[in-house]
Image (cartoon, rainbow, N blue to C red):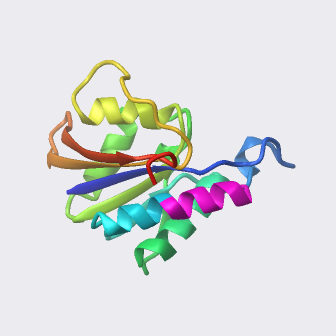
Amino acid sequence: MELYLLRHAIAENAAAGGDVNRRLTEEGRAQLRRVLERAHGAGARVSLILTSPYRRALETAEIAAHELGYEGKLVRCPSLVPEASPEHLWEQIRLHRDEPAILLCGHEPLFSAAVAYLLGSTRVMVHFPTGAMARIDVTAFGAAPAGILQWMLTAGTA
């Protein structure tokens, strides 16, 4: 399975209703489109999009769906909120093991920890900036994941 992790792009600092309701900025939207254009050029195609229910992640998922030609529904997933654990996220991924390519739209600190976990590390070793996207190929769906990092794109590389 191809697993794509896409951190939301730059969001406004504050919003009525708190952190959950923060929107993407125009700069963030532009940054995101550049990263997604590059990912699409690298062959990124998705069969399912799972997204955090936070507004900035939902907006990111909507833009990703458009840019990557995804026509399915966006599935809101509580396992993608910032304070979620990589283990709970892995359980969600395993529920969809028959999908060829899943895009996850979420947040930090979850994504840095999730990348390490998916690659079999007990330490966080990846900085996952806003608007970044990584591809991990999952090779086994046991209790512990087995993944291989294929690439990571950031706004600075797009």
Q: Residue at point 51% right, 49% down?
A: 155
Residue drawn 72% across the image and 60% down it: 26
Given residues 95 and 5, the one toward you in this image is 5
Task: Characterize the magenta stretch by its predominant secondary structure.
Answer: helix
Residue 64 can be seen in this image? yes
Position of residue 148 relative to residue 28, above or below, is: above
Q: Residue furthest top?
A: 123
> Does 62 sit left or right of 35 as displayed?
right
Residue 21 placement (x, y as % from top left): 75, 51
Would residue 58 be seen by someone viewing this image from the given angle? no
Q: Residue 69, position in %: x, y?
A: 41, 78
Q: Residue at x 31, y 69 (%)?
A: 45
Residue at x-position 29% and y-position 19%: 122
Q: Is residue 90 left or right of residue 18?
A: left
Residue 30: in magenta span? yes
Q: Which residues are magenta?
A: 25-34
Q: Is residue 150 magenta?
A: no
